[in-house]
Amino acid sequence: MITRMNAFNRKGITRKGFLAAMGFSTAGLCAGCSLEQPSAPSNANKGAGQNSSGITEITFALDYTPNTNHTGIYVAQEKGYFDEVGLKVTIQQPPADGADALIGAGGAQMGVTYQDYIANSLSSSNPLPYTAVAAIIQHNLSGIMSREEDHIVRPRDLNDRTYATWNLPVEQATIRSVMESDGGDPSTLKMVPYEVDDEVSGLKAKMFDAVWAFEQWAVQNARVQNFAYNYFAFTAIDQSFDYYTPVIAVNDGFAKENPDAVKAFLSATRKGYEFCVSNPDEAAEILLKAVPELDADLVKASQKFLAAKYIDDAEKWGVIDSARWQRFYTWLNNQQLLENKIDPSAGFTSEYLG
C-alpha cells in the first residue's frame, strides 16, 4: 500500500497518496523558501516561539509533495506576507507516516491534513493533540474518473466494472454507498489493487476501469494530455461526502501558548490564497519557481481551476462550516467505520480565523 512517488512530473495527486503513508526524496525540491527533511521531534514544539529578533518561528508541514493545494503558502512566503506579520515560516515535507503525527508531537507547529484523518485520530484511544483551523479548499473535489469510451457517468454504471482500490474501509464503504444509492449492485464491482501513481496512465493501460481521483489534479492532467475521460463527483451523489480535504491544522499546545501567531499565520495565508484567486497565472509561476520539478502545463491548468475553488461559495477563505463538518462525521459513525464513535463537532475551531 505504500509507494514512492517519482520526481515531480504528471503523476497525479491520488487518493492513495492522501490515505496512505508515503516516503520520498526532498533533494533539490525548493528554491526561494525553506524546505527541510523532518526528523522525529524529541520535544513538543521544539524550536517554536520567538527568536532573539522578536520573530515567531513556525514549521509548517505539507501533507504531500508540493502541489497546487499548497500554492497559497508559497505565495505568502514569496510575497513576504509572513514577514509582514512577524513570522518566519519553514515549509517542510512530511515524514513517511504523514504530517499528522509530526504536528501532534510539535515537530511542526502547523501543517496540512484532512478531515477524515482527524476523524481517525479522534476515534483512537490516544488522539493527537491537534485541531483543524482553516479549510484550504472549500469543497471536496474528489470523484470517480474513467475512460470516456466506457460510458461510466454515474455510480450504477460501475456495475460489472473494475475499480482500483487501496483496501481502506472508508474508501470502499463510500463506493458501495454511492452505487447503492444510485440503484447499482456493489457485489458486481471487481476491486483490484491500486498499483500506479498516475490515474491517467492506469486508465490508458486498462489496468482498471475506474479510479478515485481529485478534479484539481488528475482531471486536469487528463485534459493536459488530451485524454478522453468521464468523471462524476461524490458531492453530486451525497452531500455527506462534502467534507474538508485538505485543511490546515495546528498543534494544540502551540496554539494555546501562541494564539496571536496562529491568527497571524492564517491572516498571511489567507492573503496568499486570495492572491491565487485573483492571479492564478502568477501564482502558478511562484509555485514553479519554488518547485521547478513540477510539470508546468499541469500546474498552470490546475491553478486556473482552483482559482474558483479555494473560496468558492464561502464568505471568505478558510471557513469551515460546522454543519458540513458534522454531517461527514455523523456518516462515519453511522457506517461504523471508526474504532470508536466520535463527537461530530470535534476536531476543528474557527477562533483563529479572522
Image (spheres, grey):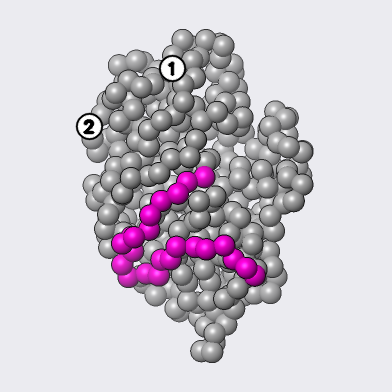
What range is drawn magenta here? 21-43
Asked whether residue 33 is drawn in magenta, I would say yes
Q: Residue furthest bottom?
A: 52
- Residue 183 image point, x, y percent: 56, 12
Q: Is residue 232 above or below residue 220?
A: above
Q: Residue at x 23, y 47 (%)?
A: 297
**Residue density around tag 2, few if under 14, some if 14–19, many if 20 or more, within 10 Å:** few
> Closer to us: mark 1 or mark 2?
1
Asked whether residue 178 is drawn in magenta, I would say no
Q: Residue at x 60, y 22 (%)?
A: 177
Q: Is residue 281 left or right of residue 79?
A: left
Seen from the viewer's position, the closer of residues 253 and 78 is 253
Asked whether residue 106 is in view, the answer is yes
- Residue 241 image point, x, y percent: 58, 34
Image label count: 2
Q: What amino acid does circle 2 point to?
A: Asn
- Residue 51 image point, x, y percent: 54, 85
- Residue located beneath label 2 in the image: 226
Q: Quadrant of residue 227?
A: top left
Indicate the quadrant containing the C terminus: top left, top right, bottom left or bottom right. Answer: bottom right
- Residue 36 image point, x, y percent: 43, 66
Label 1 element class: strand
Q: Is residue 147 left or right of residue 186?
A: left
Q: Residue at x 37, y 69 (%)?
A: 33
- Residue located beneath label 1 in the image: 162
- Residue 313: which disc? none
Q: CA distance from mark 1 to mark 2?
A: 23 Å
